[in-house]
Amino acid sequence: MRTRKRKLGLAFKDELSKVNRPFGHFGRASKDPEWQDNFLPNFTPEEETEKVSPWRLVVLACVFLVVFFGLFLRLFHLQVVQGKENRELADSNRIQIKVIHAPRGVIYDRNGKILAENNPGFRLKEEFISRDEALSLEAKGNRATDELEVDAIRYYPLGPVTAHILGYVGQISPEELKDTKYTGYRMGDRIGRSGIEQVYETFLRGKDGAEIIEVDASGKKLRSLRKVDPIPGKNIYLAIDADLQKVAFESLKSGLEKVNSCCGAVVGVSPKNGEVLVLASLPSFDGNAFTDPNF
């Protein structure tokens, strides 16, 4: 039994020796070409190097040409067709015109006493500011898009005493700005509403100046390019005597209180030349109330 098993083992070993082993003693691949072909993938020359169709190259080239031509047309439109407009827009962002408001003319009485004058004041001007500044102002409860610019506030020293003579000034309305009568006025300008202020508006108003300034991206001033000073309004002298006017007004007020009345008027005329020296009327108003920014 043992002898038979030994013979079978030798026979099986002899059969194996007839077969070319794929690897040598140290794992090297056999040099048999037939064995190597059996282990290579089934590739064909057409699969290894696929040829690109010429039509694909033509289509790809056409796509690139169309895109390039479209970009060229867009650039031409921006630089040539809209070049002037775009330059003006760029300059408007870099250069600003700051209005310098002309002071209104002063009104005097016959003796040179001031009846209407200008006090220093400010006007709110809308402008763009940086986001951080807007958030900071908003947190403080201020208007983030407003800037203070120097302006004058009309002041009447005698108040109600000369109100009917002088009248008052008020901001121009959007409807009035459409009227050719107010050509050259801007929103926020003040015009005469009654009395001397209204009748002599063109004399008292003056002509605003301007300053052309260069600003940075945030709108802050860098330098002044040009400045045109404003032309102040013309002064006016009235025949009214301020001292007599005040006495007449107080006397009229006292007299009306005695007779329990509210309405009355006093007129004083010079016998020499007919000039009106006094023109008092009740009830009256205070013109300063209309120049109050909160009015």
Image: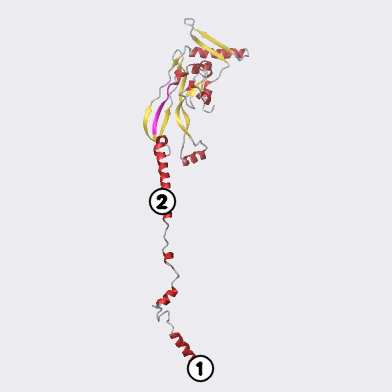
Mark in the foreground, 2 or 1: 2
Residue 288 at x, y = what percent?
52, 22
Regarding mark 2 in the picture, which secondary structure is present there?
Answer: helix
Residue at the (56%, 14%) spot, across then down: 281
Instruction: Report if residue 287 lies within the magenta region.
Output: no
Residue labelled with disc 1: 4
Q: Residue furthest top?
A: 272
Q: What residue does disc 2 label?
A: 61
Which residue occupies the foreground of this view, 293 or 126?
A: 126
Secondary structure category for the residue under label 1: helix
Whether residue 79 appears in this view of the structure is yes
Instruction: Determine if the magenta segment contains residue 207.
Output: yes
Q: Is residue 171 visible?
A: no
Q: Position of residue 145 (x, y in %)?
A: 49, 35
The one nearer the camera, 95 or 222, is: 95
Image position of 61 (left or right of 245): left
Outermost residue, right side? 260
The residue depicted at 47 percent of the width and 29 percent of the height is 123
| Mark 1 residue crowding within 10 angstroms, few (<14) / some (14–19) / many (20+) | few
Say which quarter of the image contains residue 85.
Answer: top left
Question: Camera-side residue: 9 or 171?
Answer: 9
Rendered view: 130 above or below 284 = below
On residue 220, the disc is none
Q: Residues within 10 Å of mark 2 (few under 14, many from 20)?
A: few
* Quadrant in which the C terminus appears: top right
